[in-house]
Amino acid sequence: MINTLFNADKILGRSRNPWMDYAKGICIMMPVYRHTFEGIANVGVGSYSYPNIRIVDVFTMGFRMPLFFMIAGAFFAITLYKKGIGDFVNAKFKTVMYPLLLWGSIQITLQLIFAGAGVNANRTPFDYLNLILDPRKLEQFWYLNALFFVSLIYALLTWYLKFTSRQQLIVGLVFYGIATYCHKMNIEIGFLSGVTFYYLFFAVGDNLHNIVLDEKHHKWLSSWKTTLIILPVFAAVEWYCTTLNLAHPEEFDFYVQHQRQDIFFFSAIIGGLFMIHLAFMLQRFNVLRFLRVIGYHALYIYVAHLMITAGLRILFVNYLHITNIPLLQFTIWPLGVIIPIIMFNVSRKLGFSWLFTLKDEDGGKKKPKESQQYFTREVVVPKENINK
C-alpha cells in the first residue's frame, strides 16, 4: 500500500544520481514552507508574529530557486546529447510547459470560483494568458515558465550556434544585468523577467556538469573536509542576507534579490554549492532516504502544493477553527508535500498520469544518439543501474 502511494521501491532501488533527488527533495520543501507561511499570515495573530518560524523561510530565500536551475543546468548537456534538439524541446513541453498550462488553469479556475471563500488571491479571466505572458502574477507558476524558456533558449544557442558552456555564462551575465536594470527602473518585461534573471544559474549548473556527474569527483564532493571549508562560508553569507532582508520589511523578504543582485548572486552560488555538497553527503551515508522520494516527485509537488495548502488552511481555519500558527505551519507544510505525491502515484496507477505530465514512462530507455553531428561538446554519461 505504502509503495503504491509513494513509489518508493522503484525510486530507492535505482542508482539514479541519488544526490540529485536529495537536492531536489530539500529544495522543494522550501517553497512549500514559504507558501504555507504566507498563507496563514492573516490567521489569528499572523505567522509573521512568530520570528522563529519566519527565520527558516528568510534564511533560504537566496538559494532555493537558483538551485533548481543549477540542477537542471547540470543535466542539460546529457539530455540534449541523448535526445537531439527536436526531442529535447518536445520533452520540455511535455514535462514543464504542459503541467504549467494544465495546473495553472486549474488553480486560476478554483481561485475564481472560490473568491471570497478564504482564497487569498484576486483573479480575473485574463490571468489564464498570464501563465505565458506574466507568470510572476500567478504565485508559483513563474518557475515553470522560466525553466521552459531558459531551457529552450539555452538549447537553441548550444545546438545551432555552438555556444560553449563558458559562452553561455557570458550570455547569462548579460541577461542578469538586463533583469537587474529592468527591476531597478521599474520596467515591466513580463515572463522575460524570470528568464533573464535565472538564465545565469542554469549556465552555472551546465558548467558544473563535468564535476557533479563524473564519479571521480564524488569523493571530495562528499568529504567532511569539504564541509569544513564550505559550511562556515555558507552560514555567514546566508545569515548576512537574512539580516538584510529582515531589515527591509517593505520588500517582503526580497530586498537582496530586488535591490542587491550582486549579493544575491553570491548567496545563490554559495547556497547552491552547499546544498549540492549536502546532497552528496546524504548519498554517501544513504540516510534520510525519504528526501529522495520527495525529490523524485518535486515537479508534481510544485504544481499542486499551493492548492493543497490553501485547501487545508481553509479547512483548518474556517471549519475546524484552528488558529494556532505553529500547529497550522507544521501540519499543513508536510501535508502540502505528501498529498501531491499520493495524488500523482494514484493517478499513474489509474492510468491518469497525463494529469501531471505527458512524458512517456519508457522514453528514458532510448539509447543515446551518440552520432549526433550537431552536438560536439564532451558529455559525461552517468551510470544508472538497477539494484538487484
Image: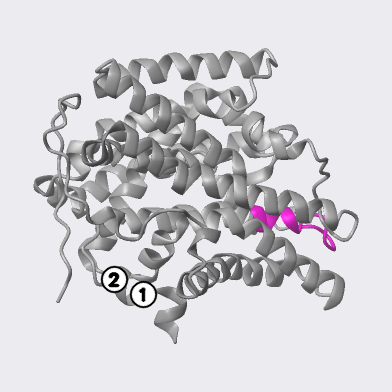
Q: Which element is circle 2 on?
A: helix
Left or right of residue 54: residue 357: left
| Badge 2 amino acid | Leu
| 277 drawn magenta | no
Q: How many numbered markers are drawn?
A: 2
Are the residues at dot 1 and dot 2 in contact (C-beta closer than 8 Å)? yes
Quadrant in the picture for residue 37: bottom right
Distance CA(mark 1)–CA(mark 2): 6 Å
Q: Quadrant of the C terminus?
A: bottom left
Q: Residue placed farthest to the right in the image?
A: 116
Q: Which residue is tagged 1? A: 8
| Badge 1 amino acid | Ala
| Label disc, if present, on residue 170 of the rendered structure | none
| 36 drawn magenta | yes
Quadrant in the picture for residue 39: bottom right
| Label disc, if present, on residue 12 of the rendered structure | 2
Q: Residue 195 at x, y = what percent?
A: 51, 27
Residue drawn at point x = 43 percent, y = 74 percent: 6
Q: Residue placed farthest to the left in the image?
A: 216
Q: Is 93 placed above or below 325 here?
A: above
Q: What span is in magenta? A: 35-47
Does the image show residue 233?
A: no
Q: Quadrant of the N terminus?
A: bottom left
Q: Residue 215 at x, y = what percent?
A: 12, 49
